[in-house]
């Protein structure tokens, strides 16, 4: 055993040296290393607002995101009449594609020289140069309709097989297919024209985009639905389009519809449902996306961390644990009501709704009299120290609990397609069910301020429960049902709750997975174990020592290819997959460390590593046991990682040591 360990350690050091020599200025990640959830995304993985960052790609890939969403601002491209500079977006699109992300691009903005009141000059001009809005072969786009020209050029440049794809020799189907016609047109801060003006913009977008790429997917701009009872923008737009004689020939000028929701998890399902109902009144069905949703936190910098004693400061905000619960509940509500893709806002805090450069140290509210003292903390990750805003978090770049919740969703639903059962309200609980090939999945949570216990009918007699704290529990059915305890929701100050809801965000949800058979394409039983090459998302809010940084796995310089499967190849390989039970943020001097592994063969033994206060990794245990007592020193931070070898001699592939759990000793 010792000889094998020394050989592996030598190979590790050699591999690290070769890896460092091979790195390029913008290294790329082997695409097969990560789950890419086809129905989950995150906004602003990168954008033209800041330099393209490999770190941001790594973190989004660690989450399991399949989609990214960002705006393509017209005024940053057409810098003077008929002069187009695509360089910034060329770099962004190329990097997104290189890393295997699917792109939801938002066409919006307006150069000052194309301004006409609250709308766009020339928007009412014919789309095509023959003086018509009727598409046809051999036609060209009318140059006197600037928006049509911009849309046509953007789609033609970035579509699969388009200008950039040809220049960079991308494989087929690599490029942008989803084009969103503006963002939140039902809010005056984004769209200052009339409803009729927007319908015209949607029509021009659809015709120009499809002329450039017949396979383009044009999306009705994501709706805020702030007050749908008095301003249902989609319903009103459909009334206008219903009077267009060419609507049927052009699929009502929309291939998809998008909606947005913040803070109130249940509303994610309600707005999706409303869109489907609006469409059905005209006999229409379209994919509906919840392509922007989230909740900012108040109990972590840059949020107003003093808001525990100031209800006004926490209005429409949540705690970090509530934010994590929102991620799972919002997706479950939206999917249950028919959403195709759910995209969360956002990867990092970035600048939120504050101006670029906004910054201040963590504070108790005392800075408010002298300027900015709090900002929007939407991020699944805290800002890095070199961010454009909010640079002073004591542990920059670390994940919030919501990152773990997101990854749990991606690992559960990202591997194979799924269908959704009905949304049920079991008294004080919400229950949703999902079917995958070989798996039956239930998500449940309390919607009241009381803890509750529910009975879930069993499909098979055993199941595994995954909780928000990272714990996993084996369940055995009694009388053909599982008994599930659900934590109470946390009281908040959100107004306008539905009857029966005690808060805008329910209690911590649980996921119950029943394996009904292996099924084609179903991942192994370890689907929701952490990939050992990745770092678990469990960080204290304010540790009292050096942070545990999230670091990427190995990098490669070869051009990546899009994956043909969402199954992590490490999990599918049969090699041992290691995991460590999360430790509390703070521990006494003597505490227990627990580890495990799964693979196609029985596990023979483990090597457990420890790192103290960010120093060098040292071997601690070489054992076939799965737990041991550790004696630490007060004031130190201890990180742990584990390797495993099975009885066939196969080692776990996490040869680049990354912390799998850690704690601070009081």
Image (spheres, rainbow, N blue to C red):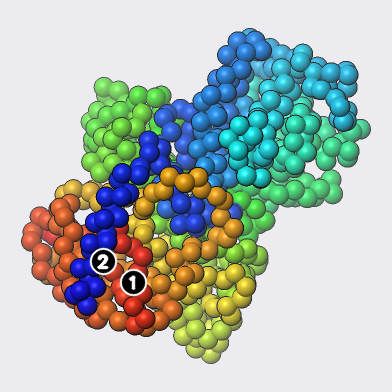
Closer to the camera, 72 or 324?
Answer: 72
Query: Image point 45% across, 61% down: which residue?
Result: 408
Q: Quadrant of the C terminus?
A: bottom left
Q: Nearer the viewer, mark 1 or mark 2?
A: 2
Q: Which residue is mark 2?
A: 8
Compared across the picture, whether 606 is left or right of 619 comes to right
Q: Which residue is mark 1?
A: 651
Residues at marks 1 and 2 touching, judged by CB atoms closer than 8 Å: yes
Image position, residue 575 (x, y; %): 41, 72
Vertical side of 474 occupied by 333: above or below: above
Query: Image point 53% across, 77% down: which residue?
Result: 514
> In the rendered image, which quarter is residue 90 located in?
top right
Query: Image point 71% across, 41% down: which residue?
Result: 217
Compared across the picture, whether 535 is left or right of 589 comes to right
Image position, residue 655 (x, y; %): 31, 62
Vertical side of 290 occupied by 408: above or below: below
| Measured Cα–Cα span from mark 1 to mark 2 | 9 Å
In the structure shown, which secondary structural element does the residue marked by tag 2 occupy?
A: helix
Hey, which residue is sitting farthest left in the picture?
A: 633
Compared across the picture, whether 171 is left or right of 252 comes to left
**Residue 219 seen in the figure:** no
Hey, which residue is sitting farthest bottom in the picture?
A: 479
Q: Count neighbours of disc 2 (C-alpha within 10 A) and say few if under 14, some if 14 to 19, many if 20 or more.
A: some
């Amino acid at each position: 055993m010792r000889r094998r360990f020394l050989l592996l350690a030598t190979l590790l050091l050699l591999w690290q040296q070769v890896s460092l020599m091979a790195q390029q200025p913008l290294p790329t990640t082997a695409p097969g290393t990560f789950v890419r959830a086809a129905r989950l995304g995150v906004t602003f993985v990168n954008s033209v607002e800041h330099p393209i960052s490999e770190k941001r790609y790594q973190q989004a890939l660690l989450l399991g995101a399949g989609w990214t969403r960002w705006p393509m601002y017209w005024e940053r491209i057409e810098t003077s009449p008929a002069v187009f500079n695509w360089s910034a977006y060329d770099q962004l699109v190329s990097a997104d594609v290189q890393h295997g992300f699917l792109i939801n691009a938002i066409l919006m903005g307006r150069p000052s020289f194309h301004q006409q009141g609250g709308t766009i000059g020339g928007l009412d001009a014919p789309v095509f140069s023959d003086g018509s809005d009727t598409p046809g072969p051999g036609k060209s786009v009318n140059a006197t309709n600037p928006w049509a020209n911009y849309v046509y050029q953007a789609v033609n440049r970035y579509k699969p097989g388009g200008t950039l794809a040809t220049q960079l020799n991308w494989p087929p189907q690599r490029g942008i297919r989803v084009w969103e016609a503006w963002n939140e047109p039902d809010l005056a801060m984004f769209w200052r024209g009339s409803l009729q003006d927007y319908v015209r913009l949607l029509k021009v977008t659809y015709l120009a985009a499809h002329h450039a790429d017949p396979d383009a997917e044009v999306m009705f701009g994501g709706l805020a639905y702030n007050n749908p009872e008095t301003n249902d923008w989609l319903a009103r737009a459909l009334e206008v389009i219903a009077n267009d004689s060419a609507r049927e020939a052009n699929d009502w000028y929309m291939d998809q519809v998008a909606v947005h929701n913040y803070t109130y998890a249940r509303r994610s399902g309600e707005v999706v449902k409303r869109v489907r109902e609006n469409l059905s009144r005209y006999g229409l069905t379209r994919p509906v996306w919840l392509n922007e949703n989230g909740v900012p936190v108040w109990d972590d910098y840059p949020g107003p961390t003093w808001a525990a004693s100031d209800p006004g400061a926490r209005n429409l905000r949540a705690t970090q644990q509530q934010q994590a619960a929102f991620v799972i509940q919002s997706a479950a509500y939206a999917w249950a009501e028919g959403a195709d893709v759910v995209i969360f806002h956002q990867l990092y805090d970035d600048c939120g709704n504050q101006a670029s450069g906004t910054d201040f140290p963590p504070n108790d509210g005392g800075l408010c009299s002298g300027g900015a003292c709090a900002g929007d903390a939407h991020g699944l990750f805290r800002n890095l120290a070199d961010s454009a805003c909010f640079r002073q978090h004591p542990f920059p770049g670390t994940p919030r609990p919501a990152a773990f919740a997101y990854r749990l969703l991606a690992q559960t639903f990202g591997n194979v397609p799924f269908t959704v059962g009905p949304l049920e309200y079991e008294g004080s609980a919400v229950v949703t069910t999902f079917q995958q090939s070989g798996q039956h999945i239930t998500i449940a949570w309390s919607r009241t301020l009381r803890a509750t216990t529910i009975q879930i009918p069993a499909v098979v007699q055993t199941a595994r429960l995954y909780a928000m704290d990272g714990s996993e529990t084996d369940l055995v059915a009694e009388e053909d049902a599982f008994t599930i305890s659900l934590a109470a929701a946390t009281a908040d100050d959100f107004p306008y709750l539905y009857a029966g809801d005690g808060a805008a965000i329910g209690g911590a949800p649980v996921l119950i997975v029943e394996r009904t058979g292996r099924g084609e394409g179903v991942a192994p039983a370890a689907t929701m174990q952490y990939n050992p090459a990745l770092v678990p998302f469990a960080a204290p809010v304010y540790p009292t020592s050096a942070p545990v940084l999230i670091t990427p796995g190995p990098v490669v310089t070869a051009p990546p290819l899009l994956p043909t499967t969402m199954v992590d190849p490490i999990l599918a390989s049969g090699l041992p997959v290691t995991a460590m039970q999360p430790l509390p943020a703070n521990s006494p001097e003597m505490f227990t460390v627990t580890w495990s592994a799964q693979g196609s063969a029985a596990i023979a033994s483990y090597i457990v590593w420890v790192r103290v206060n960010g120093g060098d990794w040292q071997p601690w245990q070489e054992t076939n046991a799965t737990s041991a007592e550790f004696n630490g020193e007060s004031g130190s931070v201890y990180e742990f990682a584990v390797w495993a070898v099975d009885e066939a001699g196969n080692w776990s592939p996490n040869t680049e040591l990354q912390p799998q759990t850690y704690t601070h000793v009081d």
